[in-house]
Image (cartoon, grey):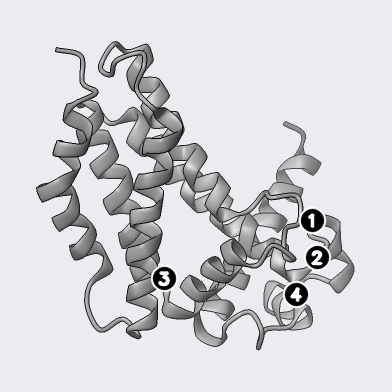
Amino acid sequence: MTNRQLAAQETKKKLIETAKNIICKKGLINTSIEEITKASGVSNGTFYTYFKRKEDIVFALSDYMFQKLYDEALAYNAGIEKRLIVYMTSFAQYIENSSLKLCQEWVRNSVDPDIFPDGKNKLSADIASISGLLNNAIQKGELKKDTPIELLAQTLTDILYGQMLCWDISGGQYSYSERTEKFCEKILGSIIEQYLEK
């Protein structure tokens, strides 16, 4: 990678991290592109080099952070149930540790088809992550070849999103990550068990 490419990568990362800090405090609707660029020390034009609109930075933040969570779960040296637990609990912890404001943006990003009319949004990316973990388990011989990957991935994502939405609606009155841990501890095994290779 050239110095120019490295500098561009660092600028984009700085814009994403700065935007996250501001959005966590104020929400996206109350955040302007000018505010993000000023706090990042770059021009408005630089913002548009990387993003078409401010909604795109929320998706980029999601893509950047949750790809890391996926990679860590995929590399975790244990069976598929444990890898799913690592992914799901890390997912919940990251959202809970961010802020309700950022959570609201991710929920909005997922339920408003006008934001990403091509269907590429956080929800589709999160389903793809769980599908990736399950497909990897089939390749490793941990899950049966006829495991309904798409249905399982959608169901586990629905659970994460349902818990995330309830946590958000409650104003963070309880711990999203603790609820996710309890689900994983008490129920996840019984869902996965029927598809495990014996």
Label 2 SS = helix
> At which x and y percent is residue 191?
21, 37
Tell us which disc is closer to us: 3 or 4.
3
Gap in angstroms between the C-alphas marked 4 and 2: 7 Å
Residue with the mark numbered 3: 98
Q: Amino acid at mark 1?
A: Tyr
> At which x and y percent is residue 176?
27, 68
Q: Closer to the N terminus: mark 2 or mark 3?
A: 2
Q: Amino acid at mark 4?
A: Thr
Residue with the mark numbered 2: 47
Label 4 SS = helix
Residue with the mark numbered 4: 37
Residue with the mark numbered 1: 50
Looking at this view, name the residue that lies furthest to the left: 186
Residues marked 1 and 2 touching at CB (< 8 Å): yes
Q: How many dots with numbers? A: 4
Front-lying residue, 196 or 12:
196
Gap in angstroms between the C-alphas marked 1 and 3: 23 Å
Gap in angstroms between the C-alphas marked 1 and 2: 6 Å
Q: Closer to the N terminus: mark 4 or mark 1?
A: 4
Gap in angstroms between the C-alphas marked 3 and 4: 21 Å
- Left or right placement of residue 17 versus residue 174 in this view: right
Gap in angstroms between the C-alphas marked 4 and 1: 12 Å
Vertical placement of 138 versus 173: above or below? Answer: above
